[in-house]
């Protein structure tokens, strides 16, 4: 992989189309924080990665766009990156990502607990340089994962220009 690796871009991890949450949603303007663990910092001499901070910022931007965020919300969202599986070489690069999402209320009761897996394949035609293609695959896997989470809690979301979704 020639070139310097760059981390996944948080803006590129936000789904391309996010609907506003229905007024009947218990989460509408009711999620006040986003936390979690996992992910890795990118080593420019090795491969692109998804950092915990960038994923959380993309997730927060997504829930804000969906009308779910409020400073005074009663739910806390935790998104733990359990795994990001990346190829070392290839023409089309597929990244698989698994994230555990939990929503707890102000009393500490769990209201949502689900592990979501996603995949994205960055085709050779998307980027000639492999490190850039891997970055795009990382961003796509995160974008699809966030879309799936939003869909599970009742907000319509699509990842945007997705080459391969599973």
Image: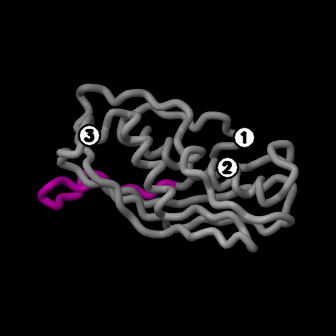
- Judged left or right of residue 145, residue 65 is left
Which of these two is toward me, 99 or 72? Answer: 72
Q: Is residue 147 above or below residue 6?
A: above
Q: What residue lies at 26% left-to-right and 54% top-to-bottom?
A: 76
Contact, mark 1 vs mark 2 (Cβ under 8 Å):
yes
Residue tagged 1 = 163
Q: Measuring 45% from the left and 52% from the top, which residue is drawn there?
A: 57
User: Is disc 1 placed on a helix, strand or loop?
Assistant: loop
User: Is residue 27 in view?
Assistant: yes
User: Could you tell which of marks 3 and 2 lies nearer the N-terminus?
Assistant: 3
Q: Main secondary structure of the magenta part?
A: strand
Res 28 quadrant in image? top left
Which residue lies under the disc numbered 3? 27
Image position of 141 (left or right of 62):
right
Q: Position of residue 96 (x, y in %)?
A: 63, 58
Task: State how many labels appear.
Answer: 3
Determine whether 158 is above or below 51 in the image: above
- Distance from Cα at disc 1 to Cα at disc 3: 30 Å
Give the left or right position of residue 90, taking residue 81 as reference. Answer: right
Residue 49 in picture, x, y percent from top left:
63, 64
**Rounded to the nearest whole Å, what is the CA distance between mark 3 and mark 2?**
28 Å
Query: Start and end of the magenta stretch?
Result: 103-116
Query: Disc 1 versus disc 2: distance between alpha carbons?
Result: 7 Å
Give how far across and how far down residue 157 sits, in percent. 49, 34
Q: Which residue is mark 2?
A: 120
Identify the residue at image location x=74%, y=57%.
134
> Residue 76 — which label?
none
């Amino acid at each position: 992989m020639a070139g310097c690796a760059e981390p996944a871009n948080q803006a590129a991890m936000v789904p391309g189309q996010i609907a506003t949450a229905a007024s009947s949603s218990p989460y509408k303007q009711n999620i006040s924080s986003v936390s979690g663990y996992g992910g890795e910092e990118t080593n420019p001499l090795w491969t692109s990665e998804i950092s915990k901070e960038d994923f959380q910022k993309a997730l927060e931007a997504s829930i804000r766009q969906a009308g779910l965020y409020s400073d005074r919300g009663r739910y806390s969202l935790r998104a733990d990156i359990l795994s990001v599986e990346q190829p070392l070489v290839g023409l089309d690069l597929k990244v698989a990502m698994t994230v555990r999402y939990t929503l707890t209320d102000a009393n500490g009761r769990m209201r949502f607990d689900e592990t979501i897996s996603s995949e994205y394949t960055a085709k050779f035609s998307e980027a000639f340089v492999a490190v850039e293609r891997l970055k795009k695959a990382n961003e796509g896997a995160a974008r699809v994962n966030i879309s799936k989470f939003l869909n599970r809690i009742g907000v319509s979301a699509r990842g945007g220009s997705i080459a391969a979704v599973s």
